[in-house]
Image (cartoon, grey):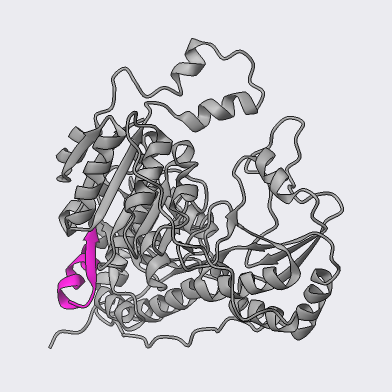
Amino acid sequence: MMAMNGAQALVRTLVGCGVDVCFTNPGTSEMHFVAALDDVREMRGVLALFEGVATGAADGYARMAGRPAATLLHLGPGLGNGLANLHNARKGRVPVVNIVGDHATHHAKFDAHLQSDIETVARNVSGFIRTAQRPEQTGTAAAAAVAAALGPPGQVATLILPADACWLPGGVVAPALPLRPRATVASETIDEVARALRSSEPAALFLGGSALRERALVAASRVARAAGVKLLCETFPARLERGAGLPPVSRLAYLAEFATQQLAGLRHLILVDAKAPVSFFAYPGKPSDLVPEGCAVRTLAAAEDDAASALEALADHLGAPREASLQPAARPPLPTGDLTADAVAKVIGALLPEGAIVSDEANTSGLSAPLHTAGAPRHDWLCLAGGAIGQGLPVATGAALACPGRKVVSLEADGSALYTIQSLWTQAREGLDVVTVIYNNRSYAILNLELSRVGAESPGPKALSMLDLSRPDLDFVAIARGFGVPATRAATADDFAKQLARALSEPGPALIEAMV
């Protein structure tokens, strides 16, 4: 029997730690990891045509599975190509095990064409970085990376693997490390927050992360009923459970002007696995800190804490009713006539199936989608957690792999879709149940909006042409079909309703280009 090499030990350790999906875009230095996929059949390898698809899919997978997937990237440039969606995973506190190949240790001194400082690149997005220099280190490094990724809170853990650490014999499978439980919030903190909420002064709970799942939402709703406080959540939550039968929570608006109105008059802001709200960008003459003047900010539960238990303890401390306020079932009527972004949202609200997963990167076109889907059957809503566009299609891809029995609906702006359009090929290859809706308004509409908000004066034709996606017009139907995904185009609300109903009723990937 041949001795196990470092790559085989690594893959076996990952599987033993619960990581059995790897989104790959490999190169020469990762070939022994690729070969090990046939030796360790429990590991599912999923090929992506671009590293940003692999990293975004790992993010989407972990959001829905509750455990990390791995990525396999080729050297520093491959990691660089995947950084934007690793940034989103970091901001969303999503666990990802990032595996980056490196040149063999004896080759590094020659500064070959692809030689780079991988650790420096990884440091921007990783809470854990380790290099396995020898084959006997790969198993222990992998186990440590998985434990670090799971946290709490979740984070990106990057493992750097020189090629010779993979190909040499001597690999040793390592056992899974014990996971750190979420911390229990101190009773003194519960008491302090309860006193603030009993003051009868205007207050709000600001929820994020783990506080946006059913158990925590129910407890937060009980607190809101008992104390008469607002329920707000992050603008772009990584995962929000919502729909009929769940407690509703209002997302903080993206535009600082609207967010300021939502927060106006508050005297107490209670953070629950969330950071105090700030403006996404700086604007001339406008504040960056969105907390109202005179409002006291207190943390009930930090990112590493057990937010659900803390909210339940707070609700009991306040003598809250056992029942939460739940979203009633309601669907908008199917619209007819012109196809607008609002009409698209109404059709989605009318047809969204039970248990759907919505990956939302519709940007300006999707502003009314949360409103029209609020009373749809229970579903999950996945947002652009770090603000780096190009996340929506890969996140939908990973979510579909994590939850094969659920329909995934990907709401995608035309400009953002082009960052990671290669996701469609992976969806076709894997037969994933993803319906993609492309809002085609032929522009970077969000940047047209921001152009005026930042105070840029009198934009001329050169400036406006930089935000325009015509000349030539993009044909997403042709693009999708080229990647192997069936596609149609809708020009009216009636067409869109028929096409979406058909796509939702059939298995496998589909794309609808909505001309809004």
- Residue 174, how many percent across, how many down? 36, 86
Q: Residue at x 37, y 45 (%)?
A: 333
Please indicate whether residue 474 sits to the left or right of residue 252 in the image. Answer: left
In the picture, residue 222 is in which quadrant?
bottom right
Q: Residue at x 53, y 52 (%)?
A: 236
Give the position of the N terminus as an image quadrant.
bottom left
Give the position of the C terminus as an image quadrant.
top left
- Residue 377, how many percent across, how many down? 39, 62
- Residue 33, how many percent across, how many down? 24, 68
Question: Which span of residues is magenta-colored?
Answer: 31-47
Q: Residue at x 27, y 39 (%)?
A: 496
User: Residue 361 lies in magenta, yes or no?
Assistant: no
Asked whether 307 or 325 is in front, the reply is 325
Q: How many marks?
A: 0
- Residue 65, how many percent across, how many down? 37, 71
- Whether 11 is drawn above or below 447: the answer is below
| Observer able to see residue 43 | yes
Please indicate whether residue 129 sits to the left or right of residue 29 in the image. Answer: right
Please indicate whether residue 106 sits to the left or right of residue 40 in the image. Answer: right
- Whether 137 is drawn above or below 44: the answer is below
